[in-house]
Amino acid sequence: MLGRGGTIVLPHPESERDPREWARLVRKHLVTIWNSVPAFLEILVDYQADPSLPQAACCANSVITAWPTRSHDSTP
């Protein structure tokens, strides 16, 4: 992806666990793919009142199967 113009967006270290900052960065940079551990995606989904989540890729040994439904149900 990076070879085709993709960009990696990371929060500043002091706000790396702040879902408000993650949501702000998603909107500001028009993030289209979210890649994190499942816990961070769950925090973002739980935080967002009016989410516009990008596609998500989670890296872990297990992913809670309800998340795709939860995140899909919460997208406009």
Image (cartoon, grey):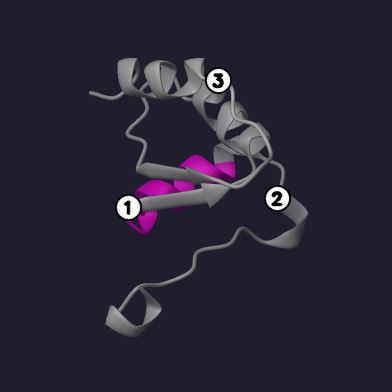
Residue 38, image x and y in percent? Answer: 62, 35
**Amino acid type, callout 1:** Thr
Residue type (three-letter) at the residue carrying disc 3: Asp
Label 1: which secondary element: loop
Q: Residue furthest front?
A: 61
**Amino acid bearing label 2:** Ser
Q: Which of these two is toward me, 14 or 56? A: 56
Q: Is residue 74 left or right of residue 66?
A: left
Position of residue 53 measured from the top left corner of the image (x, y, whole percent)? 37, 36
Above or below for 30 versus 23: below
> Residue sitting at 29 percent across and 24 percent down?
75
Q: Residue at x 70, y 51 (%)?
A: 16
Circles 1 and 2 in contact, beta carbons < 8 Å = no
Q: Is residue 25 left or right of residue 20?
A: left
Disc 1 and disc 2: Cα gap in Å?
21 Å
Residue 46 circle label: 3
Closer to the chain start, of discs 3 and 2, is: 2
Q: Position of residue 74 (x, y in %)?
A: 35, 18
What residue does disc 1 label?
A: 32
Quadrant the C terminus occupies = top left
Camera-near label (1 vs 2) is 1
State the residue position of label 2. Answer: 15
Binning the other alpha carbons within 10 Å of mark 2 as few (below 14), some (14 to 19) or many (20 upward) gives few
Residue 43 lies, in percent from the top left, at: 62, 28
